[in-house]
Amino acid sequence: MMMRIALPNKGRLADGALELFERAGLKAEFRAERALVARLGSDFQAIFVRAQDIPEFVADGAAEFGITGRDLVEESSRPEIVELLDLAFGRCRLIVAVRDDGPVDRPSQLRDGTRVATSFPKSATRYFESLGIPIQVVPVSGAAEIAPHLGVADVIVDLASTGSTLRVNGLKEIGTILESTALLIGNRNSLESAEAGRSRDELLAALESVLRASEKRYLMSNVPRDRLDEVRQVLPGISGPTVVDVLDKQTWVAVHAVVDADVVYQTIARLKELGAEGILVTRIERLMP
């Protein structure tokens, strides 16, 4: 049985999802340019729908898996959905904002009955209930930033990444409801079957190998044999560096190791201090534990 994965058809998560699957060896194969379905390898089929609809598709069993934002999963609040993997892209925040020329600097200063313009009514209501502030939700489907300037609402609850859109529209952030990234989600009931369980494990292994590799680099270098103990302290790798004799050079050895991407420049500097030469750093496509 081919498992269905609901993917965003456009927007901030669409390109990231397709790129991740391609890097995991599950490149989408479309029958036509505007097709709404595609094969992902031999075991999965992608269906392309709006990101905000994906939690409902998965919860209702129309797809066994889906990729969408945490903000949309939280807004859906469907108990049938289980989070399988944080995919670490599409990072943004669901925030509370007000006019920057107003006196309010934090959510606790808002009065009861404050009008809140948002396309996330459930999340906004839960947040303000946790603060003991009853609100009046003003549903909007887009361009919430204009609402405070038109007198439609006093506050907005909306997604932000850098905050530049808020500043351009004369708004200031006064609170964060949640941090959001893309998630792989599944249908809790569907995954109880043995077949779906195997598909889940295979999918998780493929995607995790890509995410794990994105944080690492493969480093190779020639180092003096008499400095090898010191080099081992610089290049611990996953289970220690691989050491290979360099042909016809008794005083040198080649070391290979997997290192954290965010400290590569420091690692190179320390190796050069130890006399290393011929340092080569490459990206890793996939990394299995």
Image: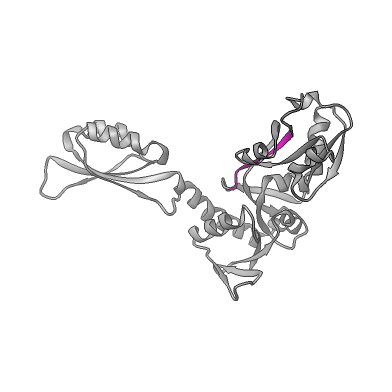
Corner quadrant of residue 187? bottom right
Residue 99 on the magenta segment: no
Left or right: where 184 falls relative to 242: right
Left or right: where 20 falls relative to 254: right
On the image, the x and y values in percent for residue 205 come to 53, 53
- Judge whether 200 appears above or below 93 on screen: below
On the image, the x and y values in percent for residue 269 come to 28, 34
The structure's colour scheme is one colour
Q: Is residue 289 visible?
A: no
Give the residue drawn at x 50%, y 48%. Answer: 211
On the image, the x and y values in percent for residue 17 come to 58, 56
Find the residue positioned furthest to the bottom. Answer: 31
Give the residue drawn at x 56%, y 45%. Answer: 88
Q: Is residue 215 visible?
A: yes
On the image, the x and y values in percent for residue 124 come to 79, 38
Corner quadrant of residue 180? top right
Question: Relative to the observer, which residue lies in front, 124 or 162?
Answer: 162
Give the residue drawn at x 64%, y 72%. Answer: 35
Question: Relative to the observer, which residue lies in front, 52 or 47?
Answer: 52
Q: Which residues are magenta?
A: 90-97
Corner quadrant of residue 53? bottom right
- Quadrant containing the N terminus is bottom right
Give the residue drawn at x 75%, y 50%. Answer: 142
Left or right: where 16 falls relative to 118: left
Q: How many marks?
A: 0
